[in-house]
Image: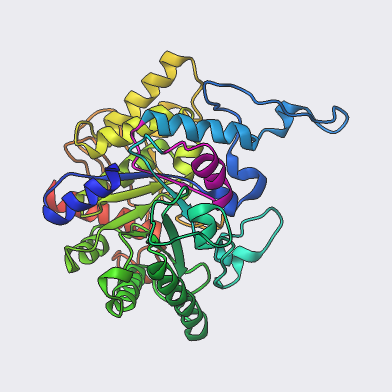
Amino acid sequence: MKSLDKKIAEIKANPKSRAFIIADAKDADMAFGVRATGTRDYLAKHGARPAQFSPEVWSREEFGYRNLPEFLDIIREVTHQGLVDIMLMSAYVNEQLTIKEGLFKNSHVTPAARANDTTDVWAVRHGCYTREPSQPFRSASIDHIQCGEIECERNGNEDFPGANLGLYSVTFVNDLAQDRAALQAYKEFREEAERKRFRHFLEVFDPNVDSRIPPEKLGEFINDNILRTLAGVPETGRPIFLKVVYHGPRAMEELCQYDPNMVVGIMGGGSGTTYDAFKLIHDAQKYGARVALFGRKINNAEHQLAFIEMLRLITDGRISPEEAVRAYHGVLQGKGIKPHRSLEDDLKLTDAAMSYGETSRRAVVTVPKQNGATDSGRTGNSTGATVTDSWPRKADGAPDFAAMNSEQRLAYDQWRLKRKFG
């Protein structure tokens, strides 16, 4: 049995279970094009793959990005490591590794493919698509994901050579026509998926354009849309789990506590600092999430295998986020790898934007090396975390929720909870 199926069953049977699903999202070629594979700072043990560049144009080092063979080597390496439960890929990469190579046949890792690519993930260089209201679109077909052909030969057989799990993405923008079109497309996909016995998980992005919803209300808007959407869907057509932006403890608990049969997961968003990723997965799990899908946070790490290992240690409850950052830097030092940031800078919470665009702001939270008293506007806790008072305020000093973005609201929620509970 794949670890995904085992953990889903355990989570539903025992709400107190610590079972946690980690997915490596290696599907960014559906969004970023050439940049999707990430920079060549980190390669798998196989090393560089041959690539020919005209010397009068640029050198291989100047180009900077991994080519696809180098990217596939990393996917193979992460899969063989065995610490993730899901490997999410594009339909093409799924064909190469799952169908043609059989990478996942003897692995507990479940292959999955991105089943649609709404326009808010069209993050091509010099393009403006991500600034327009999201529109539904689907490049991949279910049959192509399952068997690599336009029509699978089924005959009651569900043992497909490809992936039988897909990510479907919906972006609500608080516009009637746009959101209705998105839900209509999802309905058509769900019905096709149910007929073809294709499992899916549902990703719900925050609005990629101005939705006229105050930042502190965005989590409620997303939660209500999810629950309203799925209320009309019987169990056979429902997603096996959700993937949402982490809007803080209240929004996460509200969603997780609504229905114990609904497994909730969080997305990683932009790269950010190492502490961003480790703190995010820790806090999301604390308040009810049981899945994390990290794409850029893993793909842009200095050493992906060590990064994933720290994620697993955190979700297993064996190490704190702060300890994990320091341990991760220790691994980098031991391997002679230069980190992207100093340890001090990597222990700052910048809360990278949870979107494919690059326009969102960041709130900064620092974690000092030692515990102790804090100055005005800050609060400490037993782990040594200190949250900077970095959110907008009204003239009387009260928090200005209407002026906060989602990152600032998250920082405020963390500060308030730490102040209340110590």
Where's residue 283, x and y in %? 26, 48
**Front one among 366 and 122:** 122
Q: Which residue is drawn at 47% across and 85% down?
A: 176
Q: Is residue 338 above or below residue 364?
A: above
**Front one among 281 and 406:** 281
Which of the 4 quarters of the picture holds residue 200? bottom left
Q: In this view, does 97 lie to the left or right of 112?
A: right
Residue at the right extreme, as displayed: 56
Residue 149 visible: yes
Where's residue 381, x and y in %? 18, 40
Where's residue 74, x and y in %? 51, 32
Residue 272 visible: no
Q: Residue at x 38, y 61 (%)?
A: 156
Q: Residue at x 23, y 63 (%)?
A: 262
Q: In this view, does 114 lie above or below 343?
A: below
Is the N terminus in the top left, top right, bottom left or bottom right quadrant? Answer: top left
**Front one among 406 and 196:** 196
Q: Give the range drawn in magenta.
A: 82-104
Tally of marks: 0
Q: Is residue 363 left or right of residue 416?
A: right
Where's residue 148, x and y in %? 56, 53
Which of the 4 quarters of the picture holds residue 70? top right
Question: How is colour applied across the structure in the image?
Answer: rainbow
Magenta-drawn stretch contains 421? no
Q: Residue at x 78, y 29 (%)?
A: 52
